[in-house]
Image (cartoon, helix red, strand yellow):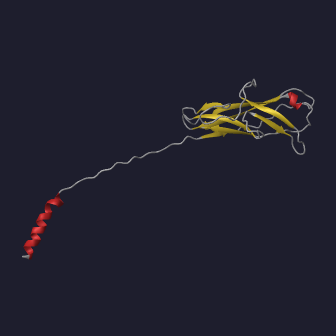
């Protein structure tokens, strides 16, 4: 009698073991490529024209630098003088004497050789402000060149102590 019960239980399970089902789910593979920018050719130091301490002539000079960004990336370039203590970001600074010489000479940064358009540091990633706009070349590898023009007014130079006056400017690329 025991054999009959066992055969009967196995016969009842056989139809369930023969059927099959499939469960599915999907997932996404993604890759995010972030924009990058760099100053690829550092600006050269600007040595303004030499003037005599009794001169009222303007002292001017220029420097160039290059920016490279990822393919198609728009960017804005601002210039920040280290002596812009008021935080105005308007492209003006102060040349400071060396050693014990505490005399100063104001100067300004410009976008053009005619010294008409100031180049400051109010640019953001989305607005040019008083900076300069740029966009990466379509190949994403070619650097975009920029020139900054610097001017110290002769009226501010006249009768200053003979010395070398300096300030530092930072190139800020916003993208």
Answer above or below: position of 72 versus 15: above
The residue nearer to you, when weighing 39 against 155, is 155
Residue at left offset 77%, top offset 31%: 108
Residue pictured at 73% horizontal, 39% vertical: 87
Residue 21, horizontal then vertical, whole percent? 23, 54
Instruction: Please tell me whether residue 162 is drawn above or below residue 56 in the rendered image.
Output: below
Residue 148: percent from the left, percent from the top?
A: 72, 31
The quarter of the picture where the N terminus appears is bottom left
Report whether 134 appears left or right of 101.
left
Residue sitting nearer the eye, 137 or 21:
21
Which residue ends up furthest to the bottom in the rendered image? 1
Q: Quadrant of the C terminus?
A: top right
Identity of the residue drawn at 87% across and 26% down? 57
- Occupied quadrant, residue 63: top right
Question: Going by the image, does 145 lie left or right of 32?
Answer: right
Residue 79 at x, y percent in the picture: 71, 36
**At which x and y percent is residue 169?**
74, 39
């Amino acid at each position: 009698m025991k054999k009959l019960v066992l055969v009967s239980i196995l016969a009842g399970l056989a139809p369930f073991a023969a059927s099959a089902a499939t469960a599915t789910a999907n997932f996404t593979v993604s890759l995010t490529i972030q924009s990058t920018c760099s100053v690829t050719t550092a600006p050269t130091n600007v040595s303004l024209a030499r003037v005599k301490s009794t001169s009222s002539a303007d002292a001017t000079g220029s420097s160039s630098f290059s920016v490279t960004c990822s393919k198609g990336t728009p960017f804005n370039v601002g210039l920040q003088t280290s002596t812009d203590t008021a935080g105005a970001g308007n492209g003006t600074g102060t040349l400071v004497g060396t050693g014990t010489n505490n005399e100063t000479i104001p100067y300004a940064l410009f976008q053009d050789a005619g010294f008409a358009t100031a180049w400051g540091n109010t640019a953001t990633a989305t607005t040019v402000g008083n900076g300069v706009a740029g966009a990466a070349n379509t190949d994403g590898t070619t650097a975009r060149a920029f020139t900054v023009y610097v001017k110290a007014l002769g009226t501010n130079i006249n009768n200053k102590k003979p010395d070398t006056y300096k300030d530092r400017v930072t190139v800020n690329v916003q993208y």
